[in-house]
Amino acid sequence: MSEEAGPGAVAATGVAAGTGAPAGARASGRAPDASNEDGPYRLAELLRKSERAVVLTGAGVSVPSGIPDFRSPGVGLWANVDPMEVATIDAFRRDPDRFWRFYGDRFASLHDREPNPAHEVIAELERRGLVRGVITQNVDRLHRRAGTQRLVEIHGSIEWSVCLRCGGRVGLERVLELLGQGKGPPECDACLEPLKPDVVLFGELLRREATEEAFSLASSADLMLCVGSSLEVFPVASLPGVTRDANGRLAIVTQGSTPYDGDAAVRLSGDVVSELEAVMSALD
Ligand SMILES: [Zn+2]
């Protein structure tokens, strides 16, 4: 299962430290793809016609919130650190103190990030009944904070940390408070065991419930709107194929190529915020 467990943690690394860019700053400022002028209109039309659309998002949707994609070289906490060494379940079990010295910075760096207009458009599509849910590989909580109701976080979330002994859960604010006291790793009040972030680390299996819900949404979708993901990391890499094979349509909004570009009914390759705002304008 290492093929599956690894990417889970990779996604977790995708929310490493921000660059300090102000929340809402555009990742690249690239305008909507001029060669594809009617793309947002075609996507709006697909959304109107579909009955069971779902959204699938990756790191690119959070880049405008100042959370760099971990694949960008030399940025964030991972620039000088090998995540395979520190962000693993083995590293956590072996030396929780060291693990949290690293991971605590990461929590703190994500804590004050705000949803950007791409998150807001996606939440609005759900409010309007145009999509039935959002599947994300991001652990940054920003979809929920933007108002998304049905959210499948396949790699977990920094919202909670868990006690592996009693299953107790502790919220982010409290974990940050404990970390701020500088007394080592945050611990479960009941068992005094070190808490583990409720995200999928390298070496951990994906959580079954979330994965099953993601595949169920994908297989019943008549449209999957993929935003800000290169669609290369399992299980996100498989989900568009599930929708396609069930005769659903694909729409892709992301910079850079994906393995599904040839299958997409609409392909928008400009900045995610500009493109999604254009889609929203086309719906009004
Ligand atoms: Zn406990």
Image (tube, rainbow, N blue to C red):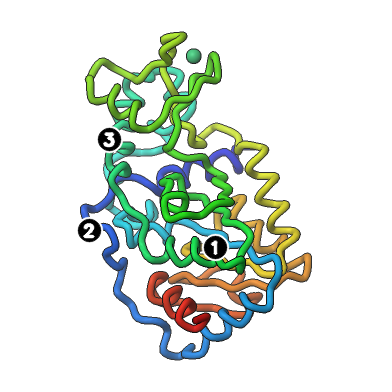
Q: What residue do we see at 61% from left, 75% from top? A: 47
Among the 4 quarters of the image, the one containing residue 167: top right
Number of residues whose C-alpha sits closer than 10 Å to that of mark 1, classed few (under 14), some (14–19) or many (20 or more): some
Q: Where is residue 84, by image quadrant?
A: top left
- Kindly identify the residue that appears in the image at 69 percent across and 55 percent down: 217
Alpha-carbon span between mark 1 and mark 2: 27 Å
Distance of mark 3 from mark 2, alpha carbons? Answer: 18 Å
- Name the disc covering residue 22, or none: 2
Reading the image, the residue beneath label 3 is 105
How many C-alpha atoms fall within 10 Å of the one at disc 2: few (<14), some, or many (≥20)? some
Could you tell me if the residues under marks 1 and 3 are in contact, i.e. CB atoms within 8 Å?
Answer: no
Tag 2 or tag 1, which sits nearer the N-term? Answer: 2
Residue 150, position as x, y percentages in the image: 58, 51
Q: Secondary structure at mark 3?
A: helix
Q: Cβ of disc 1 within 8 Å of ligand 1?
A: no
Q: Nearer the viewer, residue 110 or 68?
A: 110
Q: Residues within 10 Å of mark 3 (few under 14, many from 20)?
A: some
Give above or below for 247 relative to 87: below
Mark 1 or mark 2, which is nearer to you?
Answer: 1
